[in-house]
Amino acid sequence: MVKLNKIYILLLALIPFFLISGPFLPDLIVSLSSLVFLIYTFKRKLFYFFNKKPLIIFFIFCIYCVLVSIFVAQNILLSFESSLFYFRFGIFACLIWYLIEKNKKILNYFYYVLLICFAALVLDGFIQFFSGKNIIGLTKSAVRISSFFGDERILGSYLSRLFPLLFALFVIKKKIKYELYCIGILFFLVDVLIYISGERSAFLYLNLSTLFILILIKKYKKFRVIIFIASTVFILILTILNSNVRNRMITGPLETIGLTKESKEKYFFSHTHDSLIRTAYNMFKDNFFFGHGPKMFRVICKDEKYAEGIQPCETHPHNFYVQLLAETGIIGFLFLFSVLYYVFHCCYRQFKTIIFKKKRYLTDHQVCLLAAILITVWPLVPNGNFFNNWLAITYSLPVGFYLHSIYGKNRKNISF
């Protein structure tokens, strides 16, 4: 298993790099490594990795989704594509926890892989923004840049979702000379790039996680405040000078929500999102407890019984909570809501211990990891498909680090 651990560490540390290539390679690595790890844990009877409350709740949710696919979904096989092997992401999180416990070098590897990926995307993204093409010839649209992601246009999502994980590793790393200045410049450029990527949800994630981190951490607070203020000033200047950016990030959202003087109606996020949400709500009302089955929104939204608005049908309703209400009912919804409750409960305990006990319930490392989890479960924003493999990998990555930080045997000496 020692040699296998080294392979695991190398492959999993490269996950941020593989995520840039698309969903296939990272999902293949996650699936195969999780399967091998599951077999290994049964052989060695390492069940303590799976008997923690958060994981038990997650696996119950997975079993529930499979049962809904079998007994409720109109198309069982299609529904199984989302539900049948969703548990692998929980096993993947446990695998990360296991590897950190066995060899802390994975922290070092993850940190530098993330740095390289972020630096490459920053360089390529700004080249595409100013020249119209990136270094491999991919062009930008009028208002969106995507770097190596091409037509996927998830550059901002990638950076904003993985930024709290990078910051979590940054706060526990022993710094070398001038490293703080280099990282500060990179963070500044990441802030700006997320904004000019044109992904409004990603920019909200960045601001939400930054606010959460700044309120709750102790070290590097001033460092992040200075960078955030500097990037905000630069973004304001850029917004004033660049009409495309201004229309995409300011004028456009106001119009789509219905907050301009000419608007007669107001919508959830946009007219299109409003239509999808209303359609999903109609589906939820029809099967309050169990929903219609994972991946069934794309099928049932065509039914005139549920369809509402100008564009009632897409592959998903673009909001995790709305999607789970429509596809898994109130029971599935409560799983995601419980994660949100947990994050806010930890936040409350952090405040309480700071004020009354003059110490901290959470370490700075844990605060950053919780920030990554918070932006995943934040309800007031449009997002992708909850069961999407690429997204599931990005939000299970910080979960693995967080599990180690609260249950790991060497969690109190977590630095590299």
Image: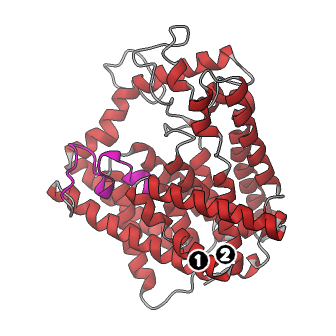
Which image quarter: residue 19? Answer: bottom left
Give the residue at mark 2.
100
Expressed as whole percent of the image width and height from the top left, the position of residue 250 reads 33, 39
Q: Are marks 2 and 1 in contact (CB under 8 Å)?
A: yes
For residue 313, side relative to residue 354 (left or right): left
Q: Nearer the viewer, residue 144 or 358?
A: 144
Q: Which residue type does callout 2 highlight?
A: Ile
Label whose residue precedes the other's in the sequence (2 or 1): 2
Residue drawn 65% across and 70% down? 364
Q: Would you say residue 29 sits in the magenta stretch?
A: no
Which SS class for mark 1?
Answer: helix
Q: Quadrant of the N terminus?
A: bottom right
Position of residue 140 relative to residue 178, above or below, is above
Residue drawn 46% across and 58% down? 25
- What label does residue 14 carry, if any? none
Q: Which residue type does callout 1 highlight?
A: Leu
Give the residue at mark 1.
107
Q: Which residues are magenta?
A: 137-159
Residue drawn 59% across and 60% down? 32
For residue 343, side relative to residue 374 (left or right): right
Cα distance in 3D space between marks 2 and 1:
7 Å
